[in-house]
Image: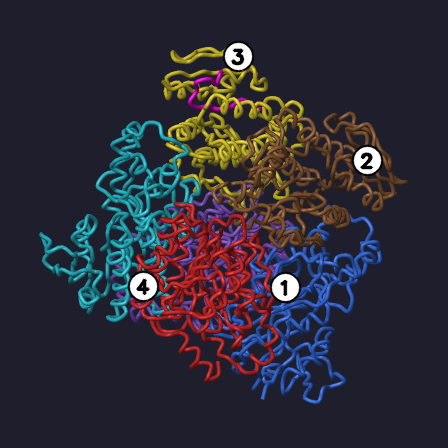
Chain colours: A cyan, B yellow, C purple, D red, E brown, F blue
Amino acid sequence: MTKFVLTGAAGALGSVLRGPLSQMCDELLSTDIVDEISDLAPNERFVQADVSQRDQIGPLLEGADMVIHFASIADEAPFEELLGPNFIGAYNIWESAHEHGVRRIIYASSVHAVGMHNVNDGIDLDAPHRPDTYYGLAKCFTEDLARMHWEKRGIECVAIRIFSCSPEPGNARALGSWLSYGDLIQLVQRGIEAPTVGYTAIFGISGNTRGAVNNAKASYLGYVPQDNAEYMAAELLAKAGKLDPQDPQHMKLGGPFAIVPLGESGVAMIKRLSEGNA
Amino acid sequence: MTKFVLTGAAGALGSVLRGPLSQMCDELLSTDIVDEISDLAPNERFVQADVSQRDQIGPLLEGADMVIHFASIADEAPFEELLGPNFIGAYNIWESAHEHGVRRIIYASSVHAVGMHNVNDGIDLDAPHRPDTYYGLAKCFTEDLARMHWEKRGIECVAIRIFSCSPEPGNARALGSWLSYGDLIQLVQRGIEAPTVGYTAIFGISGNTRGAVNNAKASYLGYVPQDNAEYMAAELLAKAGKLDPQDPQHMKLGGPFAIVPLGESGVAMIKRLSEGNA
Amino acid sequence: MTKFVLTGAAGALGSVLRGPLSQMCDELLSTDIVDEISDLAPNERFVQADVSQRDQIGPLLEGADMVIHFASIADEAPFEELLGPNFIGAYNIWESAHEHGVRRIIYASSVHAVGMHNVNDGIDLDAPHRPDTYYGLAKCFTEDLARMHWEKRGIECVAIRIFSCSPEPGNARALGSWLSYGDLIQLVQRGIEAPTVGYTAIFGISGNTRGAVNNAKASYLGYVPQDNAEYMAAELLAKAGKLDPQDPQHMKLGGPFAIVPLGESGVAMIKRLSEGNA
Amino acid sequence: MTKFVLTGAAGALGSVLRGPLSQMCDELLSTDIVDEISDLAPNERFVQADVSQRDQIGPLLEGADMVIHFASIADEAPFEELLGPNFIGAYNIWESAHEHGVRRIIYASSVHAVGMHNVNDGIDLDAPHRPDTYYGLAKCFTEDLARMHWEKRGIECVAIRIFSCSPEPGNARALGSWLSYGDLIQLVQRGIEAPTVGYTAIFGISGNTRGAVNNAKASYLGYVPQDNAEYMAAELLAKAGKLDPQDPQHMKLGGPFAIVPLGESGVAMIKRLSEGNA
Amino acid sequence: MTKFVLTGAAGALGSVLRGPLSQMCDELLSTDIVDEISDLAPNERFVQADVSQRDQIGPLLEGADMVIHFASIADEAPFEELLGPNFIGAYNIWESAHEHGVRRIIYASSVHAVGMHNVNDGIDLDAPHRPDTYYGLAKCFTEDLARMHWEKRGIECVAIRIFSCSPEPGNARALGSWLSYGDLIQLVQRGIEAPTVGYTAIFGISGNTRGAVNNAKASYLGYVPQDNAEYMAAELLAKAGKLDPQDPQHMKLGGPFAIVPLGESGVAMIKRLSEGNA
Amino acid sequence: MTKFVLTGAAGALGSVLRGPLSQMCDELLSTDIVDEISDLAPNERFVQADVSQRDQIGPLLEGADMVIHFASIADEAPFEELLGPNFIGAYNIWESAHEHGVRRIIYASSVHAVGMHNVNDGIDLDAPHRPDTYYGLAKCFTEDLARMHWEKRGIECVAIRIFSCSPEPGNARALGSWLSYGDLIQLVQRGIEAPTVGYTAIFGISGNTRGAVNNAKASYLGYVPQDNAEYMAAELLAKAGKLDPQDPQHMKLGGPFAIVPLGESGVAMIKRLSEGNA
């Protein structure tokens, strides 16, 4: 019997994953900090838990084969707010995995771990960490933690560096950075079904015509994106109009996160910029 | 209102670009050293100018948004002949762009900037300059000039390293090096419409089955070639017959330019070789 | 008149190549250590010869344009057994080629020359030799020999690092490593028809969704795989079941060869493991 | 008037630095979690503060030119114990520096940020993070934090990756990893006096004959080690006796930390191993 | 009989080289655009010539074994002014060398060919061209020209990328960038006496404690600097005072040239900055 | 009790090593194909054995701690002659080491494993194999064999790529390539006394001013050359006179071996060239 644990199950991406995950295992234990979630699959069980509390999250991993760890604050925020869910939460997951003999963790990392690289650097998976925010720093922290747990304890991890995951590409930057829900699901599935993965990072983007990064070094995972933001190119480019080439947000992989003040919400900034003209 | 300036408008490639460019802007100012050109588009204006004369070319850039700089002698020639159009001309364009606040230049660079690399080196866009001719040296000069103007003054540039641009692939080497007119147009359009480009070089080849170079580091531009020289493979390989593996022209990216004496016409040499058996 | 020599003509892969090769040349001389082979093509001639005996194999190369060198023991074996066919045999081929002015050799190298790299290293063609067996060491030896003969004597070589070449992908590992017969034939043909190749190595795998290696640096050869093991994914993954992530055979390119004791048959080990559950 | 702040002033290394630092500035503010320290220099002031408490540490940075940040638990420990001083403490320092306009931070990083690399990898400063312990992970975290603060806010940092800093080289491993007190002082001084440093990491080792890492990429700092552990070679090698080549602690930069269980004290392990025979 | 030709013989560096060069050959032909130079060595002859005029400079190379090419405007200047001596002059030297069978050219290149790299990039000789001025662009041009003449015609060249060559280190930046006259002479001599050099670039700096670049890839030339700017460190650092870390001139190899407006004198800027406080 | 086995003990280098080795162990077993050697050390025993005969060489390794494997034909020769001592001999040593539990092998590899690289490539220890002769190919073979035995069986190896080992530097090339006897002894000693080495290659050259290669990646071994060929520079350069820059022997690391016909003696060629004027 196969048991998976999904953290952050009530979040935007967790909600997308619940259905597909329930079909990849015998038992899906979904958890989140919210009180309840609706529409449980027949083999799905929900347990409320705060990932930043080891005694809450730890016991859920008992008997699990894999953890799909998506719980976190999904935006730039003050470090003090990120500390529990994004840093301590990751620690709790890996230590609990070790305690319960869980073999592998699929982790929702982010482009913001490398957001200060330029789009025309054409980076691949060997590029060093260059976080653009405390949010990105938490992803760097967890990737390094995951690599260490593989090298010291043999716990496997696929870290998916999610770019802009949404139903539709929402602005000009998303022509390069969009990750469709379908491709997210595929990435998670590939990470789960590969016979062995050690520690592997992979960029989570769809097959966008204007994608700026190179996944060749993780090709063994067999990720073949099915979607491409290009169908929205004419509309979104027109909407963006002329941009300031000296503005780092247009040259950095992290986009607006590259210029957002540390600790302030990047989502609010994107909204503000979008309502303006970026 | 958007104004583009196209230099070398009467040349082989400039002629291909005039129509498409006229549709990407409100006003297209086409210029060349020849007296006149025919078939102007409704929003196209022609002004005769010698790119090697700053006082002729400079004023044309006033109010321009972008310059598409294709004016040059398009063949190996004595340095003294290349000096005006290919070296000084480039200088004139960038200085005039600075003077008039032009934001970006799309530049017709060439494979001959890196022509002494071998086909089985599989170079990517980080490979160092290795010019094969004075013609190629002028491309190295202009690429370095363009990078400097980006780093010092913020003038953007996409340098398209054009391989063998022609209506049809013309010889065995072109199976790897062909650039179709359609793909050239796409490259120029991608360079124009990308929100920001900084300084970016990209190889200008079609999606040839036997292409020898790797554009992954400029993938953010979204260039997706539509053509492939392979449809001519059987015919052209048969025509080429057996080649001398020790002859550098078959192993070097620059092809015949890799063996043409400096300062002598490579086009004449290609013709001569083609009439023979290469 | 074009003459090709195929060694190892009676082997599993040699048998696949005989027909297609006979159509690429005027005269195909097939040779093997066996007494005879059946179904000769009209322009094919068979001569029994032991590749480890220079006086047997050498004279066959007289007048040849190319040698397709596939003769070898195709499995891990004691070094003493490999010495004749896999080491001395290669030496005999290259020296005889030099003696008779043969221009190019297509060589059946193997993934086992680099079998100790990990699948998530995402290696390309510049990765250093890391043999996993004496069998792989013979491939390293021959690749180095071939490169030297190109650099010192101008004899060209394409070394095809064959992964798992078989009619169908046979186990979970083959989802990444399969090379179909059709793609093998294409690789050999590309190596033969390219105008010049110098010394070039290329990975011999089909276009597998889960392929772990990168052929970009040999793209000029124009190899475009037509097959993909993925059609067997569901079946083979199910058959494999859960694997031990700490077991090097699942993380190394060489697969079971990465753990087979030196000098013992890897094929037997694969069979044993397959009958178990790996 | 120049003001420096030294954190961890009562620690083993802080105590070494207090005197020299007091001579490089007009006012030295030394702080530590202990109650008091003795032998204050004339221009030195001590304030007790817990670096993990922003309201305690923050105000001390007012008017400071530089912070020399050495406060931390200097050993592997449970993550929960490291969280305050080693993670949150670093955050507090950088945020407070930003708040008070401090220009530069000299940071006591550690070899354990890269401790899982092998000694015969010969790594240089571009090698990726591979922490060997939670202690090392805190160093990775702080280095990434520091780089981000430089790229986003212009706060400079020199991260000194301290190896084995002690009065004398204490075991066979220290022949490669020793950092003398004198060389530590020089490293800190170089970091302080360099006109500009951006974000720079440098390995903190003496000029040991058997040093395994390469500082060439930070040569502009002008660090020229004056000490060398080699004078103890005969004695320490004899004491070590034969070692197990398969034991990772002898091949990894991190030494015993490469094998210490996560969260347990590496110092205790070293003591235990030393009393045995490693 | 050995004949050397020195161009720019009356310049600051040419004057330093005349004496030593006269002792390395049988006949030294010194040339410059000035009318005359004094203190000729017994085997030295002076001929006035403008390097930008082929008919003046070309005939002087007849019978020469080597050219030591130092003629150029040694400062940033309008491109129009640099064109003759720095661009066309280089062309004239190489073409004349080809015409007269000269075997090797020692060329005074400059750090300003790579001046936009950061000091903490720790670049080595493989770093790409990133000129900081038109002056630097002329050096890039000539280096590419030289490499091409080696690859196409077999004319050897050692390009010495001179940093800050002066009798004494003159400011804080020179602690890293100084090249003493003695070390310049050694570099030229090494370039002359090496049996073969092909095309080789080497950084021209003394053995400065704070040097930022790495000459390891040209170690075969045997350049062992004898001088070190460090003896001036205390004085020059004190004089410099506090610098603005955000000011690119302190982080770029090119120093003030990294911020000098294109076409304006960098020397004047340095003077101006030095009189201020940089 | 420590037992070392030295193969090739009667050879030029073996003779140099016997004395020093006898002082590093309790028992030195020296072996060679010759009948006897003189001047045995008190703790040295000589046994005649042909390294190409497993039954002769194998039993000698019983109880050994280390093997110092220097037996080989030390010159280019027909492959058939090299096969026994240089190829099979190496195999015999490693298999016998495995059989008898020997922990480490110090191997006399050679520059000729990488002899086709250019001196101005400035290669380091990561450069790929590019043998210049069959002699060099045997070194490539053995290095790959050694790496495999480390990765598969845990037998350690230090491969010393010996350049020109002789009492005095003998010609102009040796100014870069000389290895003094003293430095050879140090290299062997460092390889023996390092606590662990895994598989490590290191260039065997003295600290020559004109050395062309970079040992930084093996710095942990602590090799600090004491000798330098430069004291002979004036004399040897004068003797060499002018060399042909187009002649590969002057640009390739392998020197005359880079041009010696495969299978013919390079020593004879060096002698011939030296008596001429190269």
Which residue in the protein does label 4 denote? D84
How dense is the environment of label 4, judged by Cα within 10 Å: few (below 14), some, or many (20 and up)?
some
Q: What chain does mark 1 sit on?
A: F
Magenta stretch encompasses residue C203 = no
- Provide residue F165's location: percent of width, then percent of height: 72, 67
| Left or right side of E115 for F175 | right
Disc on res. F203: 1
The amino acid type, in three-letter code, at marker 4 is Gly
The amino acid type, in three-letter code, at marker 1 is Phe
- Residue D127 showing in the rendered view: yes
Seen from the viewer's position, the closer of residues E240 and A227 is E240
Disc on res. B48: 3
- Residue in the image at 37% along x and 74% along y: D265
Disc on res. E30: 2
| Left or right side of B123 for E139 | right
- Provide residue C172's location: percent of width, then percent of height: 32, 61
